[in-house]
């Protein structure tokens, strides 16, 4: 277990295998925490951090795979789920689109059509 853990290998695995391994790691973490409570040896206490990091890597890969599958599934519809859209800022997300900005009310159309801008001929 002294070798560095590679996430590259996880990305090649199937989601079912990842979930099985994740459950094993969670069980191991529970065991390590019970050893910690019962004043266990220091070698096992140092493994708690490693197991937590490994669990985080597994969860990261699982979430990446889920996000990618959702992206490919919704690619044709053009509507992404809210959590996959760009965050930006609240003001940017809520401002009007170009077409909405270009729209005019009936009153504005009447005013534009009935009173067009005047054209003046300038002397030189």
Image (tube, helix red, strand yellow):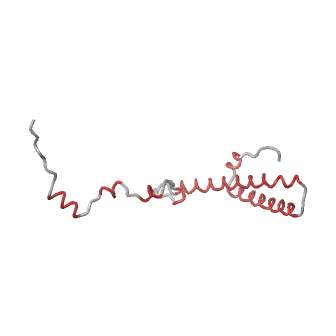
Pick the residue in front: 122 or 39. 122
Residue at x 10%, y 42% (from the top left corner): 121
Residue 122's image quarter?
top left
Q: Which residue does the image show at 34% across and 58% down from the upper left?
A: 100
Residue toward you, 7 or 51: 51
**Picture coordinates of residue 104, whole percent (x, y):** 27, 60
Q: Is residue 5 left or right of residue 106?
A: right
Q: Could you tell me residue 57's position as x and y percent?
A: 70, 52
Quadrant of the rendered image containing residue 3: top right
- In this rendered view, identify the residue nearer to me: 4 or 40: 40
Q: Position of residue 59 (x, y in %)?
A: 68, 56
Q: Nearer the viewer, residue 29 or 61?
A: 29
The image quarter in which residue 38 lies: bottom right
User: Where, quadrant-wise, is the C terminus in this rendering?
Assistant: top left
52 vs 122: above or below? below
Q: Residue at x 71, y 59 (%)?
A: 19
Residue that appears at 78% across and 59% down: 24
In the image, is 88 to the left or to the right of 16? left
Q: Is residue 110 left or right of residue 68?
A: left
Furthest-top residue in this view: 124
Q: Is residue 97 left or right of residue 49?
A: left
Q: How many marks?
A: 0
């Amino acid at each position: 277990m002294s070798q560095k853990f590679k996430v590259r290998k996880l990305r090649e695995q199937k989601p079912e295998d990842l979930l099985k391994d994740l459950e094993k790691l969670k069980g191991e973490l529970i065991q390590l925490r019970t050893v910690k409570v019962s004043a266990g040896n220091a070698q096992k206490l140092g493994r708690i951090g490693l197991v937590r990091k490994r669990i985080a890597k597994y969860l990261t890969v699982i979430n990446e795979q889920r996000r990618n599958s959702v992206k490919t599934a919704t690619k044709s519809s053009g509507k992404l789920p809210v959590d996959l859209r760009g965050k930006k800022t609240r003001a940017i997300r809520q401002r009007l689109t170009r077409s909405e900005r270009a729209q005019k009310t009936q009153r504005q159309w009447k005013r534009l059509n009935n009173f067009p801008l005047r054209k003046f001929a300038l002397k030189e």
